[in-house]
Image (cartoon, helix red, strand yellow):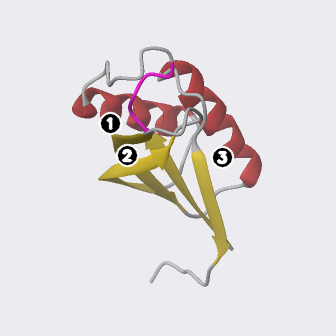
Amino acid sequence: MEKFTLYVGLNDKDSKVQEISTVEAYKILENILLKHNVEGATIFEAVGIYKHEDKTFVTENTLRIELLFIEKETVKAIVDTIKIVLNQESVAVQYEVVNSDLW
């Protein structure tokens, strides 16, 4: 099965600063996941660092979401919703084949 990890930076794509608190963003993401009938997810707080198009380095609060038991098409729909609701340029998505089961 595939495991998907989404990295959602919290800086607004237009203002380049965080406009929604981390706690509020967590609640928004939780609601998005529930609306897409996600069977299970884990959300972590992190700090993201990346080089922007203008060559400056950016540090931002980030929420990392791990998803199992989900179809790729559903993940794509979730990412599309996140980008609109949180005004994001992109969401980094990592996926890998893993062995996983519920015991």
In the image as oriented, which residue stretches furthest toward the front?
55
Which residue has dot 3 on it? 75
Tell me if label 1 and label 2 are in contact, CB under 8 Å.
yes
Which residue has dot 2 on it? 63
Q: Amino acid at mark 1?
A: Tyr
72 vs 11, left or right, is right
What residue is shown at x 32% (from left), y 25% (from top)? 18
Residue 89 sits above or below residue 51 on the image: above
Q: Nearer the viewer, residue 70 or 26?
A: 26
Provide the residue span drawn in magenta: 9-13
First in residue order: circle 2 vs circle 3 = 2
Residue 72 in the magenta stretch? The answer is no
Which residue has dot 1 on it? 26
Q: Position of residue 6 (x, y in %)?
A: 53, 51
Q: Amino acid at mark 2?
A: Leu
Q: Nearer the viewer, residue 86 or 35?
A: 86
Question: Are there few (<14), some (14-19), or many (20+) residues within 10 Å of tag 2?
Answer: many
In the image as oriented, which residue stretches furthest toward the right?
73
Q: Main secondary structure of the magenta part?
A: loop
